[in-house]
Image (spheres, helix red, strand yellow):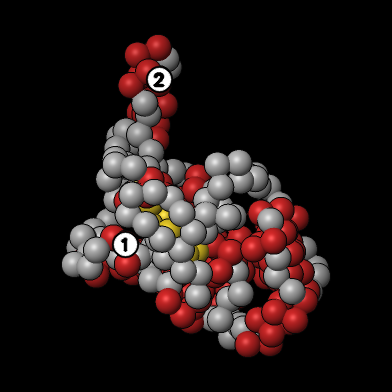
Amino acid sequence: MTPNHWISDIYMINNTSWVNNSRLTAPFINLLKGTNDPRISTYAMLPGSTSSYVNGDKTPANQKGYPMFGQAAEPRSTFSTSNKNTFGKYDAPYIHLSYAQVQFQLAELTVRGVISADAQSYYESGVVAAMKQLYVYGPEGEISEAQIENYLLENPYAPSNQEDALKLINTQYWIEAHFNWYELFANMRRSGYPDLYRTEASAAGYQLPKRLTYPSSEVSINPKLQDAVSRQGADVVTTAVWWDVD
């Protein structure tokens, strides 16, 4: 079990080749399509082949996410995978911590009253930075100023209460941190958002994991590990870390 299997925007179907294995999830694709997010073509494409990783259809309206729980009836080739020319490149950049993430964190600190500032300004600055930074993935990662402006107009920062604001901010954080699976797993547990996976899991009769278990190598060489387990709770995926919002 890995975090991207459960709560990220990528679903690893089995241990076969990447071509028939990796698919973008339905919650991720549906959100991008539902908000007319211009990043969808940078992130996604329909597979161009079932035997080799080649260019495919990148038309936003045609993208389709893989269901998170249970096997889909349709062939895997009908579900979106990573754009071969951007995130799907073998030498694609990996962003560990971005300016956009910091802007979203500052927006949340403002909403929580930790700092005195304008949450909307930080939020919009984060969205702009998140889209502009995609240029590092090549020409297909470039988002125009007009596209960014239209996105913000169609999806304004207009929360009705604090929880709504936290949902907006951390959902954008989730989109921005695409491919950084462990950060997504951590921030979702910390903030509780987006709650798309928790809702789908509950409806399907599943419980999302709260942590990763210790690897066998750690168990065998760390004499203090059991002391930690006695304080934190059983070494199972349903034991919450201390900072889990739930």
Nearer-the-camera pick, 89 or 182 = 89
Nearer-the-camera pick, 80 or 238 = 80
Residue carrying label 1: 77
Q: Secondary structure under badge 1?
A: helix
Residue carrying label 2: 218
Q: Residue 75 appears at what percent x and percent y?
A: 24, 63
Q: Residues within 10 Å of mark 1 (few under 14, many from 20)?
A: some
Q: Is residue 22 above or below residue 120?
A: above
Nearer-the-camera pick, 183 or 235 = 183
Q: Earlier in the sequence, mark 2 or mark 1?
A: 1
Q: Residue 158 appears at what percent x and percent y?
A: 64, 85
Q: Amino acid at mark 2?
A: Glu
Q: Is residue 59 left or right of residue 128?
A: left
Q: Residue at x 35, y 34 (%)?
A: 213
Q: Residue at x 65, y 45 (%)?
A: 93
Q: Residue at x 74, y 74 (%)?
A: 144
Label 2, label 1: how many angstroms apart (C-alpha)?
Answer: 39 Å
Q: Is residue 48 above or below residue 4?
A: below
Image quadrant holding the N terminus, namely top left
Q: Residue 230 appears at what percent x and percent y?
A: 35, 28
Q: Are marks 2 and 1 in contact (CB under 8 Å)?
A: no
Which residue of the protein is positioned furthest toward the right in this rendering? 117
Q: Residues within 10 Å of mark 2 (few under 14, many from 20)?
A: few
Q: Residue at x 31, y 62 (%)?
A: 77
Instruction: Tell me if I can see residue 189 in this picture.
Output: no
Q: Is residue 53 left or right of residue 98?
A: left
* Quarter-of-image position of residue 199: bottom left
